[in-house]
Amino acid sequence: MFVEVARMDDIASGGMIAVEANGKEIVLCNYDGKIYTVSRRCGHTNAPLEMGTLEGYILTCPMHYSQFDITTGEALSGPVPRSTGDEPLPEHLKNALQYTGMLLSRIKIYDIGTYPVKVEGNSIMVDA
Ligand code: FES
């Protein structure tokens, strides 16, 4: 059943907002004036995807930079270790980052869900 979750003027072109529909957390993505919906939780370790970036149809997770196709929910690339730049790090911090990187590489990344969406006038409706 479609429910209204937002208005078209709530979300600029290239923008994303988080909404809830029927108890599900969803991100609305405005790609070239058309609205797409994806699950709010990253297919890696559940980061809130509306805090990432949207370039064209590619959504990049804010936590470890996995990328998803918002038109299908397909995971396009896996997590990337955070860059620490060229400054030498204290040994304990370097070890902690290496351990975290090893753990991240062992976590499978999943495609994210998408939901039927329609726009009626200024109203964005989602069937979740
Ligand atoms: S939580 Fe999204 S890439 Fe790790």
Image (cartoon, rainbow, N blue to C red):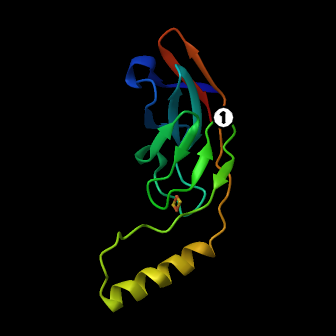
The answer to whether mark 1 is within 8 Å of ligand 1 is no
> Which amino acid does the dot numbered 1 rest on?
Thr
Frontmost residue, 76 versus 70: 76
**Is residue 126 positioned above or below 101 on the image?**
above
Residue at left 65%, top 39%? 114
The residue identified by callout 1 is 71
Q: Kindly identify the residue that appears in the image at 50 percent across and 56 percent down.
A: 65
The one of 118 and 56 positioned closer to us in this rendering: 56
Q: Residue furthest top?
A: 121
Q: Residues within 10 Å of mark 1 (few under 14, many from 20)?
A: some
User: Is residue 24 visible to the viewer in this orientation of the structure?
Assistant: no
Quadrant where the N terminus sits is top right
Q: Is residue 10 visible?
A: yes
- Quarter in which the C terminus is drawn: top right
User: What element does badge 1 sit on?
Assistant: loop
Image spot of residue 4 (x, y percent)? 51, 23
Quadrant position of residue 106: bottom right
Residue at the far front in the pictured view: 86
Looking at the picture, how far across and down is residue 76, in whole percent?
Answer: 66, 51
**Residue at the (43%, 35%) spot, across then down:** 17
Query: Where is residue 9 shown, x and y percent of the image?
Result: 39, 18
Query: Which one is in front, 32 or 21?
Result: 32
In this view of the protein, which residue sits in the foreground, 84 or 26? 84
Position of residue 26 relative to residue 127, above or below, is: below
Q: Residue at x 45, y 18 (%)?
A: 8
